[in-house]
Amino acid sequence: MLKCIAIDDEPLALELLEDNISKVPFLKLVASFDSAVKAIPLLQQEQIDLIFLDIQMPGLTGLQFIQTLAQKPMIILITAYEKYALDGFNLDVLDYLLKPVSLDRFIKACGKANELYQLKNKSNDVVTQAEYFFVNVDYSMLKVVTKDVKCVEGMKDYIKIHLVSSTKPVVTRMSMKAIEEQLLLPNFIRIHKSYIVSVSQITAIRKNSVFLGSMELPISELYKESVSALMGKNPI
């Protein structure tokens, strides 16, 4: 459950925002404010995961408010002005919604926040990565050392495990979901429905690709935020 607050100086806009939040099951609205200044005491007292924030407000604008925050929650800007989009993203906001905001666009932005929240929580969990696991290859159980896994490629009912120590991959009948449970964050990350990669083997990231040395693998749209969050970078 994401604890959130809503800030907008327009009563009708704030009421609509509260109604939209009530329709998203993983959001818990802690408080609403008609100015950014009024929200500051709450943020100093309570951990808030997500802020829905208007930009044009008297006294302290939304962008000025963001710059006052020492510990920034995730922020979704909701405004009638498109011209502040670049400024917003330069302040690492999660999303930028233009009024009037449709419910489906609002839910999509909230889904992005929830995915990032879950990823961060999973990354912070104390989990022991198994040093090795076994897979079925040619009627034998083959031992695979976890640190030797470079990446995993999905091929329908089979997977191909590429190793650091060998040019010959291990091919076994297994689902991507099953192998993903073996290869845990933060050591491995899913970048595509067909690819899981070792974070330690990543040598470069471009807009739509991850490079493992000379190997170039695609990043799908679904996993871009996850890659950005794990690498501690701005959205790619």
Image: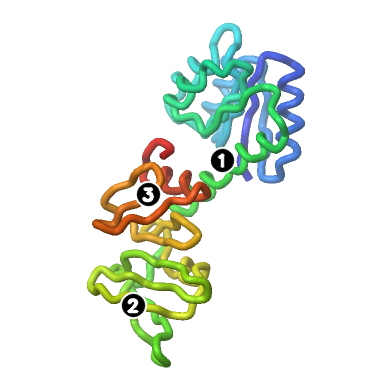
Q: Where is residue 4 in the image (x, y as percent from the top left)?
A: 62, 34
User: Mark 3 or mark 1: which comes first in sequence?
Assistant: 1
Front in this rendered view, residue 41 or 186: 186
- Does 46 sit left or right of 10 as displayed? left
Which is more N-terminal, label 2 or label 1? 1
Nearer the observer: mark 3 or 2; the answer is 3
Please determine whether, in this image, residue 148 is positioned above or below residue 85.
below
Q: Cα distance, mark 1 to mark 2? A: 35 Å
Q: Nearer the viewer, mark 3 or mark 1?
A: 3
For the residues marked 3 and 1, what is the alpha-carbon distance in whole angstroms? Answer: 23 Å
Residue drawn at x 32%, y 75% as measured from the top left: 169
Badge 3 is on which residue?
Answer: 209
Seen from the viewer's position, the closer of residues 230 and 156 is 156
Tell me the residue at 36%/45% (across/down).
231
Q: Where is residue 153 in the image (x, y as percent from the top left)?
A: 41, 67
Q: Report the amino acid beneath label 3.
A: Ser
Question: Circle 2: is it few (<14), some (14-19), or many (20+) Cα within 10 Å?
Answer: some
The residue located at (28%, 76%) in the rendering is 168
Q: Which of marks 3 and 2 is nearer the N terminus?
A: 2
- Say which quadrant the C terminus sits in: top left
Q: Find numbered disc 2 in the image and state the secondary structure of the residue it sits on.
A: strand
Residue 200 in view in this figure: no
Q: What residue type is labelled 1?
A: Ala
Secondary-structure class at tag 3: strand
Q: Residue 22 location, x and y as percent?
A: 75, 37
Res 113 label: 1
Give the residue type at disc 2.
Val
Q: In which quarter of the image is residue 160?
A: bottom left
Residue tagged by mark 2?
144
Callout 3–callout 1 Cβ contact below 8 Å: no
